Image (cartoon, coloured by chain):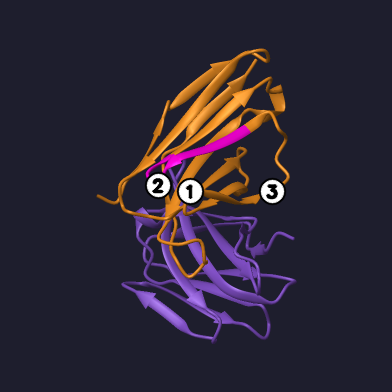
């Protein structure tokens, strides 16, 4: 199974809402990532978890809160978002966090903040 | 800083060849190449590690010149399925973060 799954596929939320994005992989990968991608732009790294510990936070605003409950799951909790946070949120995983490993991406959650 | 890719966009007829370049201002440890079709997730193509190697499979290959901090992706005898946006991802020496390049949109027409 070389699949990374993400739920939901689409999410519309107001600026006062609290929601969560979920990512799951069953490849035994020990590194998991959150990326944000705006239209016609490359993915931008947000967070990296290595062995269930947060290893990189790319100065992401605190309204985005990541969580790694176990080695297969990665969540992104959203609170008080702004319209400019609307984007495609991609989750990825790799065997390790060193970049000699390929990253497997999920299909993404398309988020719209109203 | 984000790696710069060239060209930004290219249109080819089926069977033609293409070269996509990726250039960084920083010393690199590795270069990844990914392809993303519209509305889909990026798909891994290959990794090149420091050492100036060239890799390839099928009709897609790539080179990495660490002295010039550049990588090139070569697509030969392009097929319709090659259409999409190609991103290089670079890892700087001493930093495990992958930074994606500006992207190259490739369109293959019959």
Q: Which mark is residue B106?
A: none
Q: Residue at x 61, y 60 (%)?
A: B97
Determine the colour of chain B: purple
Q: Chain of mark 2?
A: A
Query: Quick one: SS at disc 2?
Result: loop
Q: Residue at x 54, y 43 (%)?
A: A34
- For marks 3 and 1 on the same chain, the one whose residue lies earlier in the sequence: 1
Q: Which mark is residue A52?
A: 1
Task: Check disc 2 and report the residue beneath it.
Answer: A71
Callout 1 environment at 10 Å: few (<14), some (14 to 19), or many (20+)?
A: some
Magenta region includes residue A25: no
Q: Report whether residue A22 is seen.
A: yes
Q: Using the numbered discs, state the Cα–Cα distance from disc 3 to disc 1 in whole angstroms.
A: 17 Å
Task: Check disc 3 and report the residue beneath it.
Answer: A58
Q: Quadrant of residue B2?
A: bottom right
Report the residue that reaches farthest toward the left: A1
Query: Quick one: SS at disc 1?
Result: loop
**Image depth: mark 3 or mark 1 in front:** 1
Q: Position of residue B44 (x, y in %)?
A: 42, 59
């Amino acid at each position: 199974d070389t699949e990374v799954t993400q739920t939901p596929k689409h999410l519309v939320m107001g600026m006062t809402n609290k929601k969560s994005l979920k990512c799951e992989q069953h490849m035994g990968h020990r590194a998991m990532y959150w990326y944000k991608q705006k239209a016609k732009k490359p993915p931008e790294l947000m967070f990296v978890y290595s062995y269930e510990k947060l290893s990189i936070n790319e100065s992401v605003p605190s309204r985005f809160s990541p969580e790694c409950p176990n080695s297969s799951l990665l969540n992104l909790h959203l609170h008080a978002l702004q319209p400019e946070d609307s984007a495609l949120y991609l989750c990825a995983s790799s065997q390790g966090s060193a970049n000699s490993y390929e990253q497997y991406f999920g299909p993404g959650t398309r988020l719209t903040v109203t | 800083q984000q790696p710069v890719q060239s060209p930004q966009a290219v249109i080819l007829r089926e069977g033609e060849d293409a070269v996509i370049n990726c250039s960084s201002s920083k010393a690199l440890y590795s270069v990844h190449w990914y392809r993303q079709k519209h509305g889909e997730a990026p798909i891994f193509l290959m990794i090149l590690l420091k050492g100036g190697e060239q890799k390839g499979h099928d009709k897609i290959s790539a080179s990495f010149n660490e002295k010039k901090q550049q990588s090139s992706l070569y697509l030969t005898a392009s097929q319709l399925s090659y259409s999409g946006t190609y991103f290089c991802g670079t890892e700087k020496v001493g930093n495990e973060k992958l930074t994606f390049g500006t992207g190259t949109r490739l369109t293959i027409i019959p």
